[in-house]
């Protein structure tokens, strides 16, 4: 869908906020806390950004974009996009939902990873739920939403951690997560170092109580090819025909070779943009995000391969 950039705001050092609306003033598709959208930037590349505004709002989507030296998408948004511009946006997708049955919620955000957490906070406040946020950044100047979260900090519901670029001087994640309180669910999002630390520190938490979302690839590299990788066939259930996927080639690339467009963004198996339904066959899932119940119906075309000789896709 095409949306208009209604406003661009300075949120913190190197972080801009973008407000997107329907050009004709219509309501936008609903989303739940933790959802993200994909935005198409120059060159046809899609980039995923978490929605940070209140999910109860129907007339706008709000995303925050960190300008990164190596990030072509973020540079384009910071340098070229202006209020009034029209951008192509996907419908919201959510791989990071709030639990409905949690007694309390423990939130950990690092840097720009605060964006999905902000939507969660809006929803948790509406539920009058018990929650506490630990927000890790380098400095106050690099802390988006600092003013908005200051009241929560005064109430004891949020804690800021500034490490000056040295994680050893910031939040002690291992100590925080050492003893899980019954009924507590954990949510974390941030840079790779924080994600690894939180994953290690919460490994002993009860099944189903730990939720997370990467905004960069866990290892910043595509899933490695395995020694037993072999070609396989993709059959297209709706459009007809078959395609052979070669060793070292992704399903998405094989489809593109045949002129069949599949939206991709990270191409590393963590964003979910290329989510594709399959009807038969046994996928070899190599992603970081799909839940067991999702894997019974869907695969990520950027990284999944096949354990069976053939996969039938709903395409």
Image: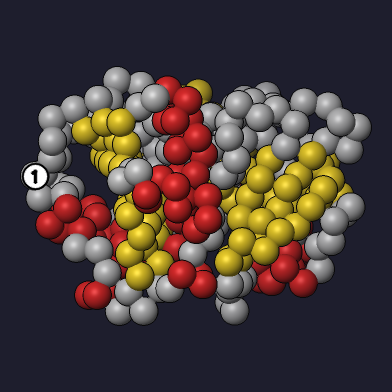
Q: 193 left or right of 259?
A: left
Q: Residue at x 37, y 49 (%)?
A: 154
Q: Position of residue 177 (x, y in %)?
A: 16, 49
| Residue 205 at least partly seen | yes
Q: Residue at x 53, y 29 (%)?
A: 32
Q: Residue at x 23, y 53 (%)?
A: 199
Q: Position of residue 146 (x, y in %)?
A: 50, 58
Residue 96 picture quarter: top left
Q: Which residue is mark 1?
A: 179
Reply above or below: 101 against 6.
above
Q: How is the image coloured?
A: secondary structure
Q: 1 left or right of 57?
A: right
Reply above or below: 51 against 128.
below
Q: Residue at x 30, y 31 (%)?
A: 130
Q: Quadrant of the C terminus?
A: top right
Q: Position of residue 70 (x, y in %)?
A: 58, 77
Residue 306 picture quarter: top left
């Amino acid at each position: 869908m095409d949306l208009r950039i209604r406003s661009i705001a300075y949120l913190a050092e190197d972080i801009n906020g973008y407000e997107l609306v329907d050009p004709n003033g219509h309501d936008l598709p609903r989303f739940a806390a933790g959802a993200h959208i994909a935005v198409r930037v120059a060159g046809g590349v899609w980039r995923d950004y978490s929605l940070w505004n209140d999910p109860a709002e129907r007339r706008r989507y709000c995303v925050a974009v960190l300008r990164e030296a190596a990030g072509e998408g973020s540079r384009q948004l910071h340098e070229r996009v202006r209020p009034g511009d029209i951008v192509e946006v996907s419908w919201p997708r959510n791989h990071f939902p709030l639990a409905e049955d949690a007694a309390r919620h423990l939130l950990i955000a690092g840097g720009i990873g605060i964006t999905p957490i902000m939507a969660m906070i809006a929803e948790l406040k509406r539920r009058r739920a018990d929650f506490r946020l630990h927000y890790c950044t380098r400095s106050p100047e690099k802390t988006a939403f600092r003013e908005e979260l200051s009241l929560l900090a005064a109430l004891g519901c949020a804690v800021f951690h500034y490490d000056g670029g040295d994680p050893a001087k910031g939040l002690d994640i291992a100590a925080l997560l050492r003893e899980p309180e019954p009924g507590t669910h954990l949510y974390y999002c941030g840079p790779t170092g924080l994600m690894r630390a939180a994953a290690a520190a919460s490994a002993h938490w009860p099944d189903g109580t730990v939720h997370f979302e990467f905004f960069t690839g866990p290892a910043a590299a595509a899933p490695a090819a395995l020694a037993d990788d072999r070609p396989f066939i993709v059959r297209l259930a709706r459009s007809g025909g078959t395609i052979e996927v070669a060793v070292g080639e992704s399903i998405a690339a094989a489809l593109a070779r045949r002129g069949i467009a599949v939206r991709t963004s990270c191409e590393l198996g963590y964003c979910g943009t290329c989510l594709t339904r399959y009807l038969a066959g046994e996928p070899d899932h190599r992603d970081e995000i799909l839940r067991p119940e999702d894997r019974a119906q869907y695969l990520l075309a950027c990284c999944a391969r096949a354990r069976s000789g053939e996969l039938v896709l709903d395409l």
